[in-house]
Structure formats: C-alpha cells, structure tokens
Image (spheres, rainbow, N blue to C red):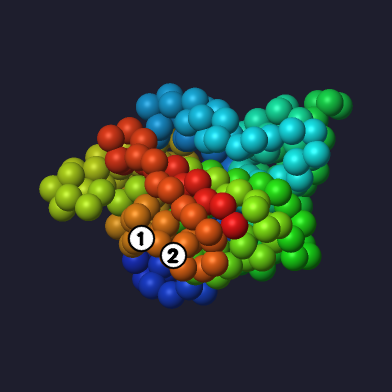
C-alpha cells in the first residue's frame, strides 16, 4: 500500500484549498480500507448509527434522496432499501466504484463523482439529503451547507452523522489523544504509514462542533436544525428541515 505523499498535516489543513487537496488524496488512499476503519473507529457501532439516522426520515417510494460523501454507500443503500430513489455522490472515484459494486438489481441507486461544495444538480431537486462524516471534511462548511439547502426542495430534510468536538477541554484532549494513538497504530498496520489516520483527530480539533454547525445550518435558511448527541457527545446527528 503506497504512502500518502503530502505536506505536513497542519500545514495542509491551513487553507481551504490545502484541505481540499489533502482530503482528495487521503480518501483515494484509504478507500479500500474505509469500511474496516469506520467499524474500528466507531467501536463497531457505525452501521447502527447510520440505521438510526435514516430512520429519522419519512422515506417512501416517491422520495428523491441525495447521499453526500457517500463513501462505500452505506447510507445510500439504507435509503434505497426503504424505497427512495437515491443518488450517491463522493469526491473519490474509488469510493464510488466500491459503492456501485454493492448494488443489487432492486436498489434504485445511481452514482456521481462530485464535490459537496459544488453540487452538479439543479435547485430543489431532492426531498432528502444525507451525509455520514461529510460536513467535517469539506474545506468550507458554510458553502457545503448552502449547496445542500439549494438542492433541497422546500420542506426537505437534511440528516448528518459526524464526530463531534467535545466542549470540555479535558474530555477533548483525552478524546483526540485516543484517536491519535489508535489512528497511528491503524496507519502502521494497514498502510505502513502512522500519519494516514492522524487526519481524523486533527480535523476534529479544527471542527467548530455540532452546536455551532447547527447554528450555521439555521442561519443559512433552514427552518429548523436539531442536534442529537451520540456516544456521550463524542459523535452527533444533525436533523434539519428547509
């Protein structure tokens, strides 16, 4: 497995452009290990969280859904198997290839390689937008949220799952230290590069936190946005309505 060639992590994440380039390279490297990593870093709870998230949406046969940063397709297929017509979008072509390979003939799912901050869709095309671990990874959260609002129809719903940034300094320090140690070990084992998964704690340290993101969502024109802590506040759901 090749090492991820990049500038120092903090330098790479110092600008929106640098983060955009870094994330694209990173997820191309880890795509084939992505399913394993999400299970390990969530203590085996990732899929149950995603099922809980999708259960918050009133999905039916006429629902048009968009799954952003779809990765290998977990949320995409959860929506499709409840009856929605779903488009999965990811910036990493390899992720999309893996997701597409899981499709069964009954799944009403299609796939697009694209960017969350410049969605290749017209206005008000979707009833539901979902994302798992997507908002934290974009170079500009406000731009991504504005794009999500643009493609949602009036009354549409936005659901998001992501790591949170604990507000308590001691808890935050312990959490980030734990993720750094575990991420370094996984990087060595899976990629022979301890830096590969250090991006996760570094991105969390720069993340404004779930409550601040909820405020940004409401400020961008959504009628409501609720935050639901998960795993004692180390993770969070966002549920917003346009």
Query: Seen in the image, is 73 located left or right of residue 44?
Result: right
Q: Nearer the viewer, residue 111 or 57?
A: 57
Residue 199 image point, x, y percent: 39, 53
Query: Badge 2 is on which residue?
Result: 216
Query: Seen in the image, is 63 located left or right of residue 74?
Result: right
Quadrant where the C terminus sits is: bottom right
Residue 123 image point, x, y percent: 75, 65
| Image position of 62 with respect to 20: above or below | above
Residue at 86% across, 27% down: 105
Query: Badge 1 is on which residue?
Result: 212
- Most extreme residue toward the left is 170
Contact, mark 1 vs mark 2 (Cβ under 8 Å): yes
Residue 13 image point, x, y percent: 41, 67
Quadrant where the N terminus sits is: top right
Picture quadrant where residue 74 is located = top right
For the residue carrying disc 2, how many other residues have a C-alpha within 10 Å: few (<14), some (14-19), or many (20+)?
A: some
For the residue carrying disc 1, how many other residues have a C-alpha within 10 Å: few (<14), some (14-19), or many (20+)?
A: few
């Amino acid at each position: 497995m090749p090492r991820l060639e990049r500038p120092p992590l903090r330098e790479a994440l110092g600008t929106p452009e640098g983060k955009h380039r870094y994330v694209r390279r990173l997820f191309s490297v880890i795509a084939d290990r992505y399913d394993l990593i999400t299970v390990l870093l969530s203590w085996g709870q990732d899929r149950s969280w995603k099922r809980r998230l999708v259960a918050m949406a009133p999905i039916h046969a006429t629902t048009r859904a968009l799954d952003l940063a779809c990765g290998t397709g977990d949320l995409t297929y959860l929506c499709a198997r409840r009856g929605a017509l779903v488009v999965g979008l990811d910036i990493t072509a390899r992720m999309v290839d893996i997701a597409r390979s899981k499709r069964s003939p009954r799944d009403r799912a299609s796939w697009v390689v694209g960017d969350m901050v410049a969605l290749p869709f017209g206005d008000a095309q979707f009833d539901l937008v979902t994302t798992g671990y997507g908002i934290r990874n974009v170079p500009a959260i406000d731009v991504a949220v504005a794009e999500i609002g643009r493609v949602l129809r009036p009354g549409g719903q936005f659901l998001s799952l992501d790591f949170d940034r604990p507000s308590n300094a001691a808890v935050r320090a312990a959490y980030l230290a734990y993720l750094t140690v575990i991420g370094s070990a996984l990087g060595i084992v899976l990629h022979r590069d301890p830096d590969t998964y250090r991006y996760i704690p570094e991105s969390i340290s720069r993340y404004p936190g779930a409550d601040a993101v909820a405020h940004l969502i409401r400020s961008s024109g959504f009628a409501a946005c609720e935050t639901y802590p998960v795993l004692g506040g180390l993770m969070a759901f966002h549920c917003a309505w346009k």
